[in-house]
Image (cartoon, rainbow, N blue to C red):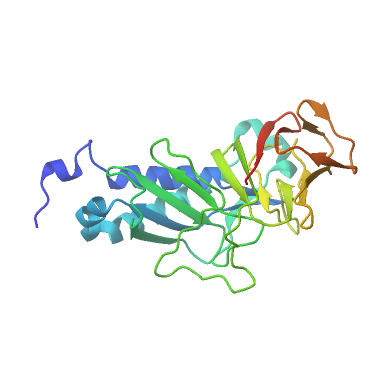
Amino acid sequence: MAANQSDFGPKGLTGQIIIAELIRNLDLGRFELNYSVLLPCIFTIYLHPGDYGRLSGVLTHIADDAKRALAERVAQLNRPSTRIRLNRKSIKEHKIAARDWVIEFVADSEGSVPQGDVEIHSELNETPQAGYRGTKTTLIDREPSVTSRRSSPSAIQPSDTQRIPDRIYAEIRYEDESGPQLFRMMQNVVRVGRGGDQELMDLALYTNDEVSREHLILRRDAATGRFFIEDRSSNGTWLDGKRLKTGVEQALPEKADIGVAEVLTLQFQVRR
């Protein structure tokens, strides 16, 4: 079927919009290490079935153009500005942890992507890491979840030991540099922080270095169902406005606001 002008007009989803969202996802998904910054390079792009069908003939071209745009963005990030040229030791190299970009388009079968919208899930490399849940971005204001991982025809399936249990013990809502997030606590111990090399977090926060790599630990006692919190940070953790003592575990109410280094707040709520 021949495409008319309205198919690719400003009111519809275009290749330029998709590429712009990929670059936004790249910027939001930065993973800081001591001497370098890893960037997402594996992208799964979910489209409304109508948009997928309309663009199916040019998706390969969009992917090729997007790879060039992403590579240019990395080059731009590695191009030192005049302001920081005198302090070159502090400049970190931005790079990807794979040989090349991987971009896959998928028609949304869950009905969560409206027509004209795009939802992008990304990973740092071909093998998702336990402490890095990936970045999810959307074109319109829909709530992303750092624990929701879709499956696609080429997705890597978790082993039996990695399979996520059905039981959700608690929910944590917060907003960091990647936008509003919802974390579902499905295990008895959750490590929270920025993470880094050899510091993989269960709940990785995308924020500045005032938040420690391992900032705090949330623990659920399997026998009693009670929850506890322990501060492990340099800049402090607050429970409902009161600063916690570092290294001392304290009971966590069923509903609480957890302040992280006065940078962001985790809204904790037990699920029954």
Q: Is residue 33 left or right of residue 162?
A: right
Q: How many marks do you count on the picture?
A: 0
Q: Is residue 28 left or right of residue 246?
A: left
Q: Residue furthest bottom?
A: 160
Occupied quadrant, residue 115: top left
Q: Position of residue 178 (x, y in %)?
A: 55, 40
Q: Is residue 17 above or below residue 97?
A: above
The residue nearer to you, when weighing 208 against 230, is 230
Q: Is residue 214 visible?
A: no
- Residue located 23% across and 41% down the image: 12
Q: Position of residue 17 (x, y in %)?
A: 33, 42
- Residue located 57% across and 60% down the image: 166
Q: Is residue 233 above or below residue 39?
A: above
Q: Position of residue 151 (x, y in %)?
A: 45, 63
Q: Residue furthest top?
A: 241
The residue nearer to you, when weighing 92 against 15, is 15
- Residue located 33% across and 55% down the image: 108
The residue nearer to you, when weighing 75 against 23, is 23
Q: Position of residue 92 (x, y in %)?
A: 67, 47
Q: Is residue 160 above or below residue 176?
A: below
